[in-house]
Amino acid sequence: MKNKFNIFSDGLKFSVLAIGLIACSRDAELQSPNLSPFSIEIPAGFPSPEIPADNAMTQNRVSLGKRLFFEKALSIDSSISCASCHFQINGFSDPKRFSLGVGDSIGVRNAMALSNVAYQEDFFWDGGVPSLELQVLAPIENPLEMNFSVPQVVERLKNDPSYISDFKKAYNREPDAYALVRAIAAFERTFISGNSPFDQYTYQGKTSALSASALRGKDIFFGEKAECFHCHTGFNFTDNRFQNNGLYSEYQDIGRARVTIKSSDIGRFKTPSLRNIEVTAPYMHDGSIASLEAVVQHYMSGGKGHPNQSPLIKPFTLTLQEQQDLIAFLKSLTDESFLNRQSLQP
Amino acid sequence: MFRIPITFLCLIFLFLNTACQKEKGCTDPKALNYNPSAKESDGNCQYPAAISPQPVQLNFHLHQHFGTPEFDTATQYLLPSGVKIQLSQLRFYLSNVRLINLDGTEILIPESWILVKPGIETFPIGTVTPGKFKGVKFLVGIDSASNSGGTSPADRPAGHPLGFQSPSMFWSWASGYIFVRMEGSVDTTGTGTPNLSFVCHVGSNALKREVQINFTDTLSVSSGAESFVHLKVQLDKLFDNVNLKVNRNTHTMDNLPLATQIVNNAATMFSEE
């Protein structure tokens, strides 16, 4: 192909191409967004996440999503962003039991960790939302969180020429709700965490990555006494289902039933992933348990006996050493490289 | 490496420009004035009326009443139970509109989603092929595929019935539309002045309700003109068997009996006009 242009002198070649570029560049910009793909690094032992056909991962989409994730203009008084309740160092969860929204209004459930959110099928503790894109709407509109409306967020972004340019590059659109929710979802799909000591031991052949205590805890975790692995299963340590873990005998917050209107779903909440569990305290849907030690105590107690309580929740005994070993194993799921990854910072 | 495709694109661009000067005319072989040498349609094909009737716009023409008078949000109304109320919001969705042919078969009007608001009478339904119809069916609420199929207001253009609304008609925490949104105040003390607020937001797939209206006279939809389905909406029926004095609020899941009563009532409030 290159030889074809040898008939031009260098100067002529340059002029012709320059004219061509001027003539075409405006058109090309208007007609296609920059689609340089963004490739997610898939850790060993992990499957590839499903990416929606209408939101392929590109550099520009992820960059725009990152900008929006840290954008306080998403809240009514421009006081908080997504990152105000999802801290990277806490696995993108909130160390507060209930996050504070605008005007310090207090939420009703513990902010969920976002590690490996690309693999989730249902969102929120009750699974009321079926996609990561749709999830974006809820915190913006929740009166206890950002207390704003998506069309008003869009109006704000349209007043910022740099956002007009970034939306164009990412989705070839003016700032709008369609691209807003997709960009944030694209950024959140890069929250892949799969390089913990457990992963290094299991998938990377580093036999020294787990301590003797963590290895003993691993056997307890995957054993039939504690039964942890039945629900906290697979590479992401969740069955992606909704379980009643016996936290209460009566539930103020009815959980999954709020979405399905079925009494058999009262007190069921999504099984959270255990990745980075060491840094995502407090625990449970309402953040009512402050430490991993107390979580283990809860499961040993066998639960409070709600009619919907999972039959797997029944009393068992672990020695103090066994409890410490189990917790050592849970802490081996902490992925320092994820908690400090530069590309996830503003 | 990048120079060659750009030059090539420019050539295509030039070629397309040249193409614009090709002969225009009717390019549809089925049309009366089909021009075989036309390369580009000029949008002026003429058809024999009998074989290809053009779809026409169909609308609902709704008269919204509360008791005898027409409904508005400024008036206080006395319910048959003797309780005085005033409504600040009353909006509801209709969807999945089907016209019933004379032989009883049904024609679905695609993408028929209608947000009924106070103070408006004409609501576009969609386009329909001319014909004669003996009735209409529709849902109060949103068809399940559009309600919980993974799309949201963010996927709709501004102004679309399923797009963002103010006040909102979508639950972002449970990804579904609010089928009926009614809010107002009720007199719970008998003083004649509404004193306590009530908020009823009703939705979820299980609570959509089917309505069928049989026309007294056949509806003739003919080409060339918009058509209207005239219905009377008796909004006071929404409060049948509802004791607002003691049962004032539902967001559906937190008070399913009241939500269910409201949609059951909504299914009875339409009649031919």
Image (cartoon, coloured by chain):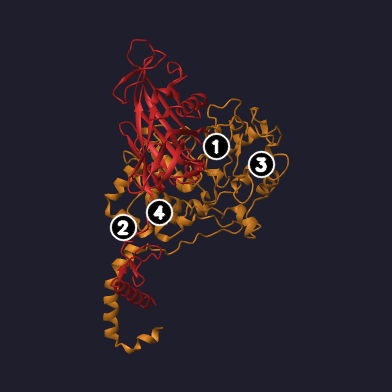
Up/down of B269 relative to B24, above or below: above
Q: Distance between the residues labelled 1 and 3?
A: 15 Å
Callout 4: residue from which chain? B
- The disc placed on residue A228 is 3
Rendered location of residue A42, percent (x, y): 55, 59
* Relative horizontal placement of residue A15, taking residue A191 as reference (left or right): left
Query: Which residue is labeled 1 in the image?
Result: A283
Where's residue A324, x and y in %?
Answer: 65, 41
Instruction: From the rendered image, report the letter of the chain displayed in orange.
Output: A
Mark 4 = which residue? Answer: B50
Report the Cα–Cα distance between label 1 and label 4. Answer: 70 Å
Q: In which quarter of the image is residue B220?
A: top left
At a point 57% along the width and 42% down the height, the residue shown is: A272
Tell me the SS state at disc 2: helix
Spot occupied by residue B169 in the image (x, y as percentages of width and height) = 40, 36
Q: Quadrant of residue A290?
A: top right
Closest to the observer, A211 or B64: B64
Do the residues indicated by labels 1 and 4 lie within the same chain of the protein?
no
Task: Classify mark 3: residues with Cα within 10 Å, few (<14), some (14-19) or many (20+).
Answer: some
Mark 1–mark 3 CB contact (< 8 Å):
no
The residue that label 2 is drawn on is A165
On screen, residue B143 above or below A202: above
Callout 4: 10 Å neighbours few (<14), some, many (20+)?
A: few
Chain under disc 3 = A
Query: Splitting the image into 4 quarters, where does residue B30 fall?
Result: bottom left
The number of numbered discs placed on residues in the rendered structure image is: 4
Of pointers 1 and 3, the one earlier in the residue sequence:
3
Q: Are marks 2 and 1 in contact (CB under 8 Å)?
A: no
Marks 4, 3 in one chain = no
